[in-house]
Amino acid sequence: MSALGGISQLPGEFLDALSGLRKAARRSEIRLEEIPAPSRLAPFAVALGAEIFASTPVTPPPLHGPARALVLPPQPEELATGRFILLYDPEGSEVWNGCFRIVTYIRAQLEPDMGNDALLGSVAWTWLVEALENHGARHHSTGGTATRILSESYGTLEDRPDTIDIELRASWTPTTSDVRRHLEAWSEMVCTFAGLPPLPEGVAHLPHRRS
């Protein structure tokens, strides 16, 4: 059963947390949807997947006749992807130091000059800490890793340019069941990884609307 869509036999505290996730605001550029949650990490869990794509895909040369049907439409470039997982154990966890735990993952491809920055990992971690603080997402017991991934191509793929990705895995314990601000902070992080400019001051994050 979908955790966000079904409420049968769910603890009240976890329901409060789900309600907060539903109310979380985010920028229109981010595509956020529920995905299967891990079943072995906690008695109750919900997971969200995020994607951000370039707004303008590359247009291929125009084709006519039968050849046109053989060409797939251009796919927009993926700028960043991530996962946000909320775990809940009514009995509490000594490892988490609480009943809730948020586990996150973000990955994005970087410009070569930025990817070679030796301080990239610490910068990515600072983005996370500042996003949580700026959104008032109170938390403790934070931990994580930042990894740079270099992809080089050889043989028949040697014409492909080398790429560098940044991958951030982090987890923390929210102080209350009100996790709305945590999702909003994490969504801002995904946008930062995607290279989106900050919203102008005074412009609110608009909630996503389903058509």
Image (cartoon, grey):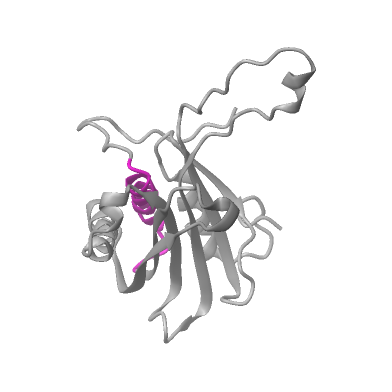
Residue 124, x across and y down, in percent: 28, 59
Compared to 183, does 197 lie above or below?
above
Figure disc tally: 0
Q: Residue at x 49, y 38 (%)?
A: 77
Image side of residue 142 versus residue 63, left or right: left
Which one is in front, 122 or 65?
65
Please state which of residues 139 and 171 is positioned toward the viewer in this rendering.
171
The quarter of the picture where the N terminus appears is: bottom right
Residue located 79% across and 18% down the image: 66
Check if residue 201 falls in the magenta segment.
no
**Residue 59, relative to residue 170: is it above or below?**
above
Based on the picture, tell me whether residue 188 belongs to the magenta stretch. Answer: yes
Expressed as whole percent of the image width and height from the top left, the position of residue 130 reads 22, 57
Magenta span dominant secondary structure: helix
Percent position of residue 15, x then y: 54, 59
Please identify the quarter of the rendering in which residue 122 is found: bottom left
Give the residue at the far bottom of this rendering.
94
Residue farthest to the right? 66
Please tell me whether residue 205 is drawn above or below residue 150 in the rendered image: above
Asked if residue 202 lies left or right of residue 102, the reply is: left
**First to last magenta residue range:** 175-195
Q: Is residue 100 above or below residue 29?
A: below
At which x and y percent is residue 42?
Answer: 57, 75
Outermost top residue: 64
Residue beneath the point at 50% across and 47% down = 159
